[in-house]
Image (cartoon, rainbow, N blue to C red):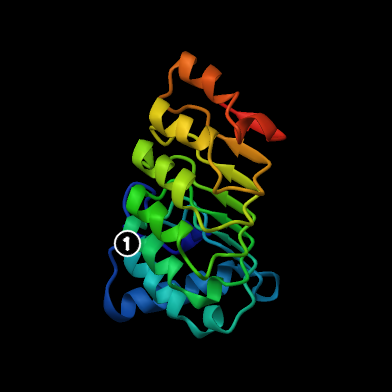
């Protein structure tokens, strides 16, 4: 059963299944406890709020009127629909650091994030342990609009050689200095070739 004790309000294997007023009350409690630094940081790591909980949180007046700079949504099972909700939220317009690991995101969720007009100030984006795969990696390489990104983690995303090589030569990540791609599906040969790509060869930190 879900419990508010210890702030791990849901079993990490399943997202929130509350509805109605019970959901609203639970999410207000989450915001009470996890909106930090005078409204500049929202740390929901491991809360597993799910898509319904995220919708309530993003609509809360404290989030809408806040001054968010850091958002940690790691392990919240929000899926592609949650990424789309986040991408359409104007309260994200000053956020520079976003953690989205372990959220069951696929290519469409990634597309929503990298096309968002409200995430243009992002410098750090962590997307490890999702399902971006080659399709998502290619989207990122060719269509990214978050041109201030400096640091990205897309480890454990089932990315093979096609996606890796697309990223290695991307022109859509002009300010990137660090990229983490370990524990994906690329071959040894693919990784060695990628290291010499026009983007990868100039990075300060590259983990394949």
Measured from the top left, where is residue 12 in percent x and y? Answer: 39, 48
- Name the one closer to the observer, 39 or 106: 106
Q: Residue at 49% across / 46% down in the picture?
A: 127
User: How many badges with numbers are in the image?
Assistant: 1
- Name the one closer to the observer, 91 or 44: 91
Does 85 sit left or right of 182 as displayed? left
Q: With respect to residue 22, does 178 lie above or below?
A: above
Question: Is the C terminus in the top left, top right, bottom left or bottom right quadrant?
Answer: top right
Instruction: Give the class, few, some or many, for how many residues have Cα within 10 Å of label 1's Cα (few <14, many ≥20).
Output: some
Does 98 sit left or right of 84 as displayed? right
Measured from the top left, where is residue 24 in percent x and y? Answer: 37, 78
Q: Residue at 67% across / 49% down in the picture?
A: 175
Measured from the top left, where is residue 106 in percent x and y? Answer: 34, 47
Q: Residue at 61% across / 36% down in the picture?
A: 199
Q: With respect to residue 185, does 142 lie above or below?
A: below
Q: With respect to residue 139, does 109 lie above or below?
A: below
Question: Is the N terminus in the top left, top right, bottom left or bottom right quadrant?
Answer: bottom left
Does 54 sit left or right of 179 as displayed? left
Disc 1 is placed on an element classified as helix
Does 82 sit left or right of 150 as displayed? left
Quadrant housing residue 66: bottom right
Q: Residue at 40% across / 78% down in the picture?
A: 25
- Name the one closer to the observer, 205 or 78: 205
Measured from the top left, where is residue 46 in percent x and y? Answer: 48, 52
Question: From where the camera sits, is residue 173 visible?
Answer: yes
Question: From where the camera sits, is residue 49 visible?
Answer: no
- Name the one closer to the observer, 204 or 142: 142
Q: Which residue is mark 1?
A: 81
């Amino acid at each position: 059963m879900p419990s508010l004790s210890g702030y791990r309000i849901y079993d990490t294997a399943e997202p929130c299944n509350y509805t109605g007023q019970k959901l609203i009350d639970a999410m207000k409690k989450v915001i009470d406890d996890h909106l930090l630094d005078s409204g500049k940081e929202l740390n929901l790591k491991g809360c597993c709020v799910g898509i319904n909980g995220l919708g309530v949180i993003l609509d809360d007046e404290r989030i809408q009127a806040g001054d968010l700079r850091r958002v940690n949504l790691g392990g919240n099972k929000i899926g592609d629909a949650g990424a789309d909700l986040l991408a359409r939220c104007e309260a994200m317009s000053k956020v520079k650091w976003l953690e989205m690991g372990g959220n069951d995101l696929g290519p469409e969720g990634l597309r929503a994030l990298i096309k968002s007009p409200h995430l243009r100030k992002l410098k750090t984006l962590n997307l490890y342990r999702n399902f971006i795969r080659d399709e998502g990696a290619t989207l990122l390489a060719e269509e990214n609009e978050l041109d201030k990104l400096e640091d990205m983690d897309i480890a454990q995303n089932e990315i093979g050689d096609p996606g890796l090589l697309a990223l290695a030569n991307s022109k859509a990540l002009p300010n990137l200095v660090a990229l983490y791609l370990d524990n994906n599906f690329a071959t040894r040969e693919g990784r060695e070739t990628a290291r010499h790509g026009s983007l990868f060869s100039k990075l300060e930190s590259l983990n394949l």
